[in-house]
């Protein structure tokens, strides 16, 4: 029997989590086990979630351990409860009623991960992510993964799917392992997608599965000091981990250019706090 567990992380964003849970409760797939991993919120989130939705299980952690470690805690808990399929979901999202059903419909032997089409929450018709490829030389996601791209009519094999929303069968976790907990925020999904592909499994985009995402809500917004620090640190960790000897000079050259470009952008905007945070993140990640 299929046992689908949806795992959400929450840290002081109870209103987002409640809105996401409300959308999940309209799901056409039944039964659906909902698990919220609360990362030691100080806004009363666990009590508020339990009061609003008694059927939702809340797993409380002693501290905010980041995305990868928080998801791992939820995955371990769900697998111990007998989960056969896992939906890993950002709490700052709203899902279409048929999203889980459409993701499940694309599973077949050899498919290790399925993702939906992701739209901007505040621009509901504008695509944020359709997944994409991973450049074999630079190990970055290649091409524009959302804006300006047409939604395919059929499922498409991808090298990368956003960690914002993913369906994984239990067998994928047993084969690939858990998420790398050195990534606090960002690049953990790129790292995991690369590992899934390296294991011989296929990643599929399910175009009929839809959800809407409040982009960068958990980090304080795009180009905030927290967002720039975590992005820079995680990028350095990712490339240190994944690049081979033959890729190293190309990646170092590419990343140096990226660092100079971000320095110019933030300096031009007078975002000195974000600029300092960005370079501190690069230092911490590489060292």
Image: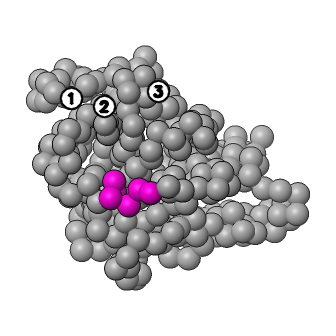
Residue marked by disc 1: 56
How would you rate the neighbour count of disc 1 (Cα within 10 Å): few for under 14, some for 14-19, many for 20 or more?
some
Mark 2 touches mark 3? (CB < 8 Å): no
Q: Are marks 3 and 1 in contact (CB under 8 Å)?
A: no
In the image: residue 176, left or right of residue 171: right
Select label 2 or label 3 by which is in front: 3
Residue 249 visible in image: yes
Q: Earlier in the sequence, mark 2 or mark 3?
A: 2
- The residue at which mark 2 appears reads as 36
Q: Is residue 5 above or below residue 268?
A: above
Counting from the top left corner in percent of width and height, residue 84 is at 39, 37
Q: Residue at 49% of width from left, 32% of height from top?
A: 72
CB atoms at circles 2 and 1 under 8 Å apart? yes
Q: Which residue bears the numbered disc 3?
A: 76
Residue 275 seen by the camera: no
- Image-based side of 11 in relation to 261, left or right: left
Q: Element under label 2? A: strand
Examine the image and state in which quarter residue 116 appears.
bottom left
Give me the C-alpha separation between circle 3 and circle 1: 17 Å
109 or 86, nearer to the observer: 109
Residue occupying the far top of the picture: 62
Within the magenta stretch, is there residue 107?
Answer: yes
Which region of the structure is painted magenta? Answer: 103-108
Work out whether mark 3 precedes mark 1 in sequence or the reverse, and give the earlier one: 1
User: Where is residue 175 shown, x and y percent of the image?
Assistant: 60, 41
Residue 7, quarter of the rendered image = top left
Q: Secondary structure at mark 1?
A: loop
Residue visible at 81% across and 68% down in the picture: 250
């Amino acid at each position: 029997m299929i046992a689908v567990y949806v795992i959400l992380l929450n840290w002081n964003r109870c209103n987002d989590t409640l809105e996401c849970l409300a959308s999940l409760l309209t799901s056409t797939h039944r039964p659906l086990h909902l698990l919220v991993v609360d990362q030691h919120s100080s806004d009363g989130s666990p009590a508020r979630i339990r009061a609003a939705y008694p059927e939702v299980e809340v797993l409380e952690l002693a501290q905010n351990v980041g995305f990868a470690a928080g998801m791992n805690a939820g995955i371990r808990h769900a697998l111990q409860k007998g989960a056969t399929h896992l939906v890993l979901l950002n709490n700052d999202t709203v899902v279409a009623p048929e999203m889980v059903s459409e993701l499940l419909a694309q599973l077949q032997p050899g498919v290790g991960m399925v993702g939906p089409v992701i739209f901007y929450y505040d621009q509901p018709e504008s695509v944020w992510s359709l997944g994409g490829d991973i450049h074999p030389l630079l190990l970055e996601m290649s091409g524009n993964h959302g804006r300006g791209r047409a939604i395919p009519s059929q499922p498409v094999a991808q090298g990368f799917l956003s960690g914002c929303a993913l369906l994984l069968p239990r067998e994928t976790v047993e084969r690939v392992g858990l998420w790398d907990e050195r990534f606090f925020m960002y690049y953990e999904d790129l790292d995991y997608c690369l590992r899934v592909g390296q294991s011989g499994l296929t990643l599929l985009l399910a175009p009929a599965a839809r959800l809407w995402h409040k982009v960068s809500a958990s980090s304080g917004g795009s180009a905030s000091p927290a967002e720039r620090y975590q992005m820079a640190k995680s990028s350095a960790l990712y490339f240190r981990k994944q690049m081979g000897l033959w890729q190293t000079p190309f990646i170092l050259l590419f990343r140096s250019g990226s660092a100079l470009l971000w320095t110019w952008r933030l300096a031009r905007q007078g975002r000195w706090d974000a600029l300092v945070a960005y370079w501190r993140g690069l230092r911490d990640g590489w060292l």
